[in-house]
Amino acid sequence: MEIRDTFSRRRCYILAAFSFVFTFLFGWYGLKSSEWHPSIIFRCTVNNTSDDIRLSRLDLLSDVRLDRMVYAKPDVLQPPRTDVLTITPWLAPIVWNGFYNRDILNAQYHQAGVRIGLTVFAIKKYVIFIKDYIETAEKFFMVGHKVNYYIFTDRPNDIPNFTLAEGRSLSVLEVPGYKRWQDVTMRRMQMIRDHTRDRFVNEVDYLVCIDVDMVFSEHIGVEILGDVVGVIHPGFFGASRKAYTHERRPESAGYIAVDEGDFYYTGCFFGGAVEDIYKLTNFTHHAMLADKAKNMEALWHDESYLNKYFLSHKPTKVLSPEYAWNNYYGSPAVVKVKRLLHVDKDFKAVRSN
């Protein structure tokens, strides 16, 4: 009986292999209809109480996508953009409009079933921006993908109810409202770090952190995802190193010498794989504490420490200024799309208690 069972199982494996090849070939040639689906194959099992072989249908390949996609062949002699830098010296892509095919990227990330977390801090009077922030994110941010919004706030009762698309959720996380706005922006690194360790690592694959006083105005999708992602500041993308507003005091933990620095990265938008975000926020938080012990603060607070981190931990993907635009800087020709916009505001009013 044992020999016959072994032989029967061997027949099952052969049949399963044949079914897989059959399925793959039909998927490859794009044969699709409502009656035929490439995920249905045969499974063979050996009945322990008899010598009979039983065949059953099983969606064993339900996660395999064999849909045919048609698009223009990439041409190595015709790059999509020649007016801007599209790759860093350490071979990280710089994402500009026209640089990628959205359909191809969506198909790849849908196969992986990625989960994206978006953190935002609505502290004190900045809570007034959260409504437009979430509503525009629902229109333009990671449309069609699984998204968890995490709203950090000291005013949970002021967070309105939102209607979210399928596969998207929203969590309100109550946190202290520090007296100074500088403490709010610097302490957020500690809060993101702690929640990443205790919660986010179990809920999402990537974490994106974007300031609340911004609105989404064009598509922002999976093209922004990477292990460590920084965004070039819109005010410095054509500037020299000398013009960068890095922390220049050598005694500061955020110090960057005038002959160092690749780009000047904005602090309003960064992201990455959830494990890498833990490392980034842990570094910046400890840098802030090191300076605080010396009774110091870096020139641009958490943005300065973020730039220090990116100096030695190069981003694996860099986003162009179209991902954090401020209309104050006009409309340069190279910024063809403004995907995320700073909201015009009275800083004195919103930063006051």
Image (cartoon, grey):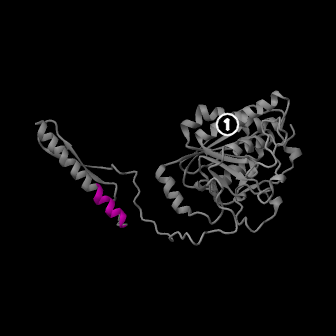
Residue 6 on image: x %, y %: 16, 41
Identify the residue at the far front of this view.
Answer: 259
**Label 1: how many Cα within 10 Å (few below 14, some 14–19, many 20+):** many
Q: Quadrant of residue 174?
A: top right
Q: Quadrant of the C terminus?
A: top right
Which residues lie in the magenta part? 20-29
For the stretch drawn in magenta, the main secondary structure is: helix
Give the residue at x 54% y 71%: 75
- Residue for point 15% across, 40% down: 5
Using residue 73 as the reference point, say whether residue 63 is left or right of it. Answer: left
Left/right placement of residue 165 relative to residue 249 reads left
**Label 1 belongs to which residue?**
192
Percent of width and height locating residue 185:
77, 39
- Find residue 287 and report its horizontal and vertical position in percent: 75, 34
What secondary structure is found at the residue carrying circle 1?
helix
Q: Identify the image quadrant of the N terminus.
A: top left
Tell me which residue sits at (59%, 41%) in the image. 274
Q: Is residue 73 shown above or below 286? A: below
Relative vertical location of residue 208 with respect to residue 72 in this rendering, above or below: above
Is residue 55 visible to the viewer in this orientation of the structure?
no
Residue farthest toward the top in the current orientation of the protein: 293
Instruction: Name the image quarter holding residue 299.
Output: top right
Q: Is residue 334 visible?
A: yes
Q: Which of 28 and 306 lies nearest the eye of the viewer?
A: 306
Give yes or no for residue 202 being in the magenta stretch.
Answer: no
Give, as a three-letter code, the residue at label 1. Answer: Ile
Q: Is residue 47 above or below residue 23?
A: above
- Which residue is outermost to the right? 348
